[in-house]
């Protein structure tokens, strides 16, 4: 969601005549779009601001995003290098704010709930894939999470607006959209009428010319069979589900206020795999939540083995001020947290590696995203969101079919099966 907000920030600035440069030292304006979900993300921002402060010559420095919502003018007090703190609620006026703050440092944090940034200009990450927010904010109260406090309650966009945006994107050559929300599955509950995520997903999948539709993030409590039915039935709905489990212990799930049990989660993924053949399932896990005993942790490790996720993002619990978890007792020591983290990451790496190696020898349709870090290769994604590296000389269209030739720990290697383009998509 933050990355998509950054696309709007770039869009607003480019519309006002600004152009991107290749390094902060060449910039007249540097904008930090920040994340508050973990303390380490905020620490990185403070570190980067510190690095800018040591330079003699620098442009206007602005900070926005979740840190701006959370800390407001405290950022100006703590970092002398910052000229402007602003929230996405006032993003439309960013060019004017930049002009004003050149005279005097300022903090402009409008009400994030009033923000209607979806209609602002956008500079997208690529020509063929696009993020499309379906809702903003979150109505859940997970005990560790700062998002509802900084992003406000859930506000769903009207479905006609979303479908129209997807139609426009297809007109511009986009082949894949990723529908975004903190909890996409609860889409529409704040709208009048019968709007549900399942009906929205079906409408988007049926937009003429859209080839792939993905979405994230799913909350296990709100993922109904109606959504799985659309995923299994609509050809453009991709077989990809990112659904954070967070813990395998019912005691910790209750303390986290997640609203489901371990068995409920395991039943749900069994249903999802049955209704969506070939599903790629990924998850998020927190280790070291307050009160997590060795037994609780072992339940999580056991769930990881049982669920056999195709990938899992494991995080160390990070205490966030103002959340219910911040005042919970039973802090897990740092060494023990790290021990559990390392063990779980190692276990999941093995499972991920096995899951990737099962694809060797199969044919996959991939969407080319751009150059890989290794310059002579292209990075592409399967319908299940796996990264495939392919030789640039092999590819003449954005949606080629490839043969998977090898599997690494986190990515696949492939070669184009033939040089003609899948589904008539010319390059
Ligand atoms: S569902 Fe929970 S973890 Fe996700 S954004 Fe909402 S409160 Fe945070």
Image: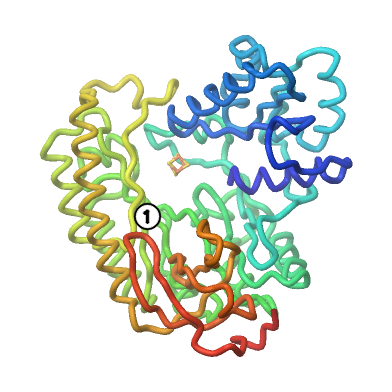
The structure's colour scheme is rainbow
In the picture provided, is 360 more to the left or to the right than 263?
A: right
Q: Position of residue 308 (x, y in %)?
A: 24, 63
The residue that mark 1 highlights is 220
Element marked by disc 1: loop
Neighbor class of circle 1 (other Cα within 10 Å; few <14, some 14-19, many 20+) is many
Say whether mark 1 is within 8 Å of ligand 1.
Answer: no
Residue closer to the observer: 149 or 38: 38
Q: Is residue 416 visible?
A: yes
Whether residue 116 appears in this view of the structure is no
Question: Residue at position x 63%, y 70% from top?
Answer: 204
Residue 407: name its quadrant: bottom left
Left or right of 55 in this view: 40: left
Q: Who's the residue at 77% across and 69% down the image? A: 172
Rendering coords of residue 416 (x, y %): 51, 83
Foreground: 336 or 223? 336
Residue at 61%, 69% (x, y): give it. 176
Q: Quadrant of residue 249?
A: top left
Q: Quadrant of ligand 1?
A: top left
Left or right side of 231 for 221: left
Looking at the image, residue 284 lies above or below residue 85: below
Taking the view exactly as shown, the residue that stands out farthest to the top is: 77
The picture places residue 303, in percent across and down from the top left corner, at: 20, 54
Residue 42, x across and y down, in percent: 50, 27
Taking depth in this image into account, of 63 and 380 the one nearest to the observer is 380
Residue visible at 65% across and 61% down in the picture: 130
In the figure, 175 relative to 338: above or below?
A: below
Q: Is residue 56 above or below residue 375?
A: above
Quarter of the image that includes the C terminus: bottom right
């Amino acid at each position: 969601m933050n990355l998509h907000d950054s696309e709007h920030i770039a869009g607003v600035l480019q519309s006002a005549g600004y152009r991107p440069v290749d390094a902060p030292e060449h910039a007249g304006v540097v904008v930090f779009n920040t994340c508050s979900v973990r303390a380490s993300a905020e620490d990185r921002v403070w570190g980067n601001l510190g690095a800018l402060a040591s330079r003699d010559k620098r442009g206007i420095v602005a900070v926005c995003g979740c840190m701006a919502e959370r800390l407001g003018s405290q950022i100006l007090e703590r970092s002398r290098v910052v000229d402007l703190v602003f929230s996405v609620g006032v993003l439309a006026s960013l060019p004017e704010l930049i002009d004003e703050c050149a005279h005097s440092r300022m903090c402009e944090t409008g009400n994030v709930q009033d923000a209607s940034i979806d209609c602002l200009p956008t500079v997208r990450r690529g020509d063929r894939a696009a993020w499309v927010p379906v809702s903003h904010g979150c109505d859940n109260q997970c005990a560790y999470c700062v998002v509802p406090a900084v992003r406000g309650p859930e506000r769903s966009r009207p479905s006609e607006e979303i479908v129209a945006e997807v139609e426009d994107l297809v007109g511009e050559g986009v082949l894949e959209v990723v529908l975004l929300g903190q909890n996409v599955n609860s889409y529409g509950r704040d709208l009048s009428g019968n709007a549900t995520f399942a009906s929205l997903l079906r409408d988007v999948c049926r937009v003429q010319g859209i080839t792939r539709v993905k979405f994230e993030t799913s909350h296990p409590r709100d993922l109904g069979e109606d959504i799985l039915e659309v995923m299994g039935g609509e050809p453009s709905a991709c077989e990809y589900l990112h659904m954070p489990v967070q813990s395998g212990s019912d005691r910790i799930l209750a303390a986290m206020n997640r609203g489901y049990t371990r068995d409920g989660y395991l039943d749900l993924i069994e249903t999802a795999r049955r209704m969506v053949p070939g599903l790629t399932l990924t998850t998020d896990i927190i280790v070291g939540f307050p009160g997590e005993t060795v037994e609780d942790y072992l339940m999580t490790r056991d769930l990881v083995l049982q669920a056999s996720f195709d990938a899992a993002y494991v995080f160390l619990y990070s205490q966030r001020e103002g959340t219910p978890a911040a005042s919970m007792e039973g802090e897990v020591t740092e060494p023990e947290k790290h021990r559990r983290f390392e063990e779980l990451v190692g276990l999941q790496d093995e499972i991920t590696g096995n899951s990737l190696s099962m694809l060797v020898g199969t044919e996959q349709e991939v969407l080319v995203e751009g150059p890989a870090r290794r310059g002579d290769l292209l990075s592409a994604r399967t319908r299940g969101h796996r990264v495939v590296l392919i030789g640039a000389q092999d590819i003449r269209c954005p949606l080629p079919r490839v043969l998977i030739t090898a599997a690494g720990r986190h990515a696949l290697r492939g070669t184009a099966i033939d040089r003609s383009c899948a589904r008539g998509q010319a390059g």
